Image (tube, grey):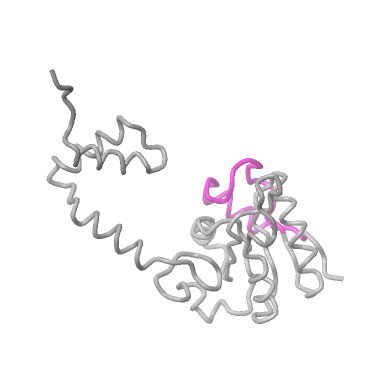
Amino acid sequence: MPFLDYPQSFRSLVEQLRRLPSIGPRSAERIALWMLRSPHAHPKALAEAIEQATNLLKLCERCGFFTDQSLCLLCSDEDRAGKAICVLEHETDILPMERTEAFDGRYHALGGRLSPLDGIGPEELRISSLIERLQEEKPSEIILALSGDVEGEATAHYLAELISPFQIKITRLAQGLSARGGIEQTDRMTLAKALLDRRFYKKVV
């Protein structure tokens, strides 16, 4: 007696859904069934949106945030030129910081943090482009909005040493952020207070 299973087309859909983060076999199966049976699923529109995002979205040439142009909306805003640059680990950290409404400068996403054990050195991060921005934009301040764990502190120290010769004020977010959690996991009020109460990280000599 043959083993009964879903058709191959359905199994292929489930397999693709399982590739998504935090989606197990049962969840993938439930999502697939919903997509095929629910009148509100609109699977064709979903597929088109995924294809469009894949083809059009890229990282901003200047700060590293998501955009469908060469520069993102914030980097194109000339009212932010010459103000502080907030340096973060990931592009996904920019939006939570912007939503605090406590910062009106520009951003720079490093794409990670220094972690020699994982093979991540300065060359793997967007550090050289940050230094180029300091020369071109001459910001009033550099805010290091990095996590408070060992890797985050090491990255902050490394950047401070590189930035010091530019005679730019360097500050660090105030205490209040979890040492293990990052910007993306911090609530809006805590993040805004950490930004407003930022402290000197390395004074200009």
Q: Is residue 103 left or right of residue 42?
A: right
Residue in view at x 38 percent, y 43 percent: 20
Q: Position of residue 158 (x, y in %)?
A: 76, 59
Count the marks: 0
* Magenta residues, start to end: 172-200
Viewer-side residue, 169 vs 24: 24
Viewer-side residue, 144 vs 157: 157
Viewer-side residue, 121 vs 70: 121
Q: Position of residue 159 (x, y in %)?
A: 74, 62
Q: Can you tell which quarter of the image residue 196 is in?
A: bottom right
In the image, farthest residue toward the front = 1
Work out whether 97 lies above or below 84.
above
Q: Is residue 88 left or right of residue 166?
A: left
Check if residue 188 falls in the magenta segment. yes
Work out whether 160 lies above or below 16.
below
Q: Position of residue 122 (x, y in %)?
A: 69, 60
Residue in view at x 63 percent, y 69 percent: 85
Q: Position of residue 193 (x, y in %)?
A: 62, 53
In the image, farthest residue toward the top = 1
Check if residue 17 falls in the magenta segment. no
Quadrant, the N terminus: top left
Work out whether 160 lies above or below 1.
below
In the image, farthest residue toward the right = 205
Quadrant, the C terminus: bottom right
Work out whether 30 lies above or below 140.
above
Residue in view at x 36 percent, y 33 percent: 24
Q: Is residue 185 left or right of residue 157?
A: left
